[in-house]
Image: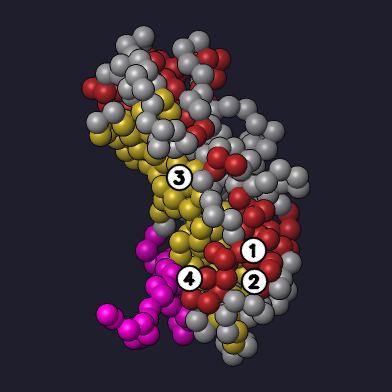
């Protein structure tokens, strides 16, 4: 089974996948996963955790779809070739359903196999060799049976980049939103504080057919506004996010930053719980400025199962000795 040496099943781990009524602590979209992903495997299997980075420019988001290119589709194809398993056997699940055009540095996903690996470097290298250059598996590690990429998440960190200058830096154009109005970062920082804590974010969520009925109450742990020259970074950490919630919060902060509205508009809009109220002041910020930076878990869930292979973070090529003469 390509990509690495495979060991049999001396002491298999049973993959414990949560039922569909598990609480969802986050995610960009909400709603139910593919039903096949919630079927508990009938055979013993091993669970593996991936940390994935991708440039979302050419993708229709993370979530699996039949026709458009999505990151999940691309990763599944690579896994299918590397493991010789089909997608229903792999049960690949991502932590966050990033939207069309949104990037990720620390997307987390898990999959299962009926066999284990004694070394993960080879399968890790094989996956990156099969993936396009705009998607990379940064880490591959064994996971505990109870670990679930989406439902075990404690919090998620998103960063939105704004290039605030008259002329756009061409090297930032795919990853930062060019905004030519001069922004007042102090006012934006003051407004961002109003998002911190437990709130009903209904007013900041776009409706989506795949949403189902997600809990609109989320906890925002921090919302930082940082200036780095012309680059303005808005970084938010929360227990979870509704569909387009981050981009809608950023859009309002941009209006506050250009001093079109005052910072105290934030609690007033939150109190309405009505998306139409936000639409009076701002539309969603473009997706290309947004990046999923990391997904946080309780440390004990990240411990490797006993006797499993160590985490692979890639390997360097080395030369044992120089084969060319020096002159």
Return the disc, 1 or 3, that comes first in the chain's sequence. 1
Residue 114 pos. (x, y %): 66, 77
Callout 4: SS:
strand
Which class describes the residues within 10 Å of circle 4: few (<14), some (14-19), or many (20+)? many
Which residues fall within the magenta stretch? 298-327
Residue marked by disc 4: 141
Residues marked 4 and 1 touching at CB (< 8 Å): no
Residues marked 1 and 3 touching at CB (< 8 Å): no
Point 40% across, 35% down: residue: 172
Looking at the picture, the colour scheme in use is secondary structure
For the N terminus, the quadrant is bottom right
Residues marked 3 and 4 touching at CB (< 8 Å): no
Which class describes the residues within 10 Å of circle 3: few (<14), some (14-19), or many (20+)? many
Point 64% across, 55% down: residue: 74
Callout 3: SS:
strand
User: Which label number is shown at residue 78?
Assistant: 1
For the C terminus, the quadrant is bottom left
User: Which label number is shown at residue 82?
Assistant: 2
Q: Which of the 4 quarters of the picture holds residue 94?
A: bottom right
């Amino acid at each position: 089974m390509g990509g690495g040496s495979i060991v049999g099943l001396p002491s298999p781990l049973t993959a414990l996948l949560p039922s569909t009524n598990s609480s969802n602590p986050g995610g960009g979209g909400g709603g139910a996963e593919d039903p096949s992903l919630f079927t508990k495997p009938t055979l013993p299997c091993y669970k593996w955790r991936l940390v994935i980075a991708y440039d979302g420019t050419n993708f229709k988001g993370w979530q699996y779809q039949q026709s458009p290119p999505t990151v999940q589709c691309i990763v599944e194809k690579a896994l299918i070739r590397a493991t010789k398993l089909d997608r229903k056997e792999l049960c690949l699940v991502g932590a966050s359903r990033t939207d069309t055009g949104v990037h990720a540095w620390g997307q987390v996903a898990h999959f299962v196999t009926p066999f284990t690996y004694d070394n993960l470097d080879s399968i890790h290298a094989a996956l990156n060799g099969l993936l396009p250059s705009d998607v990379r598996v940064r880490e591959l590690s064994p996971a505990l049976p109870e670990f679930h990429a989406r439902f075990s998440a404690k919090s998620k960190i998103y960063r939105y980049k704004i290039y605030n200058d008259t002329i756009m830096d061409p090297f930032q154009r795919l990853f930062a939103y060019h905004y030519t109005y001069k922004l007042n970062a102090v006012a934006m920082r003051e407004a961002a504080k109003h998002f911190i804590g437990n709130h009903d974010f209904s007013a900041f969520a776009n409706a989506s057919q795949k949403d189902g009925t997600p809990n609109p109450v989320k906890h925002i742990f921090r919302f930082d506004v940082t200036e780095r020259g012309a680059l303005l970074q808005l970084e938010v950490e929360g227990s979870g996010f509704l569909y387009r919630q981050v981009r809608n919060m950023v859009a309002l902060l941009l209006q506050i930053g250009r001093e079109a509205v005052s910072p105290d508009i934030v609690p007033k809009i939150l109190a309405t719980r009505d998306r139409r109220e936000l639409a009076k002041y701002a539309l969603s910020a473009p997706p290309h400025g947004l990046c999923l930076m990391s997904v946080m878990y309780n440390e004990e869930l990240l411990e490797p199962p006993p006797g499993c292979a160590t985490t692979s973070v890639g390997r360097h090529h080395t030369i044992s000795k120089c084969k060319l003469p020096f002159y």
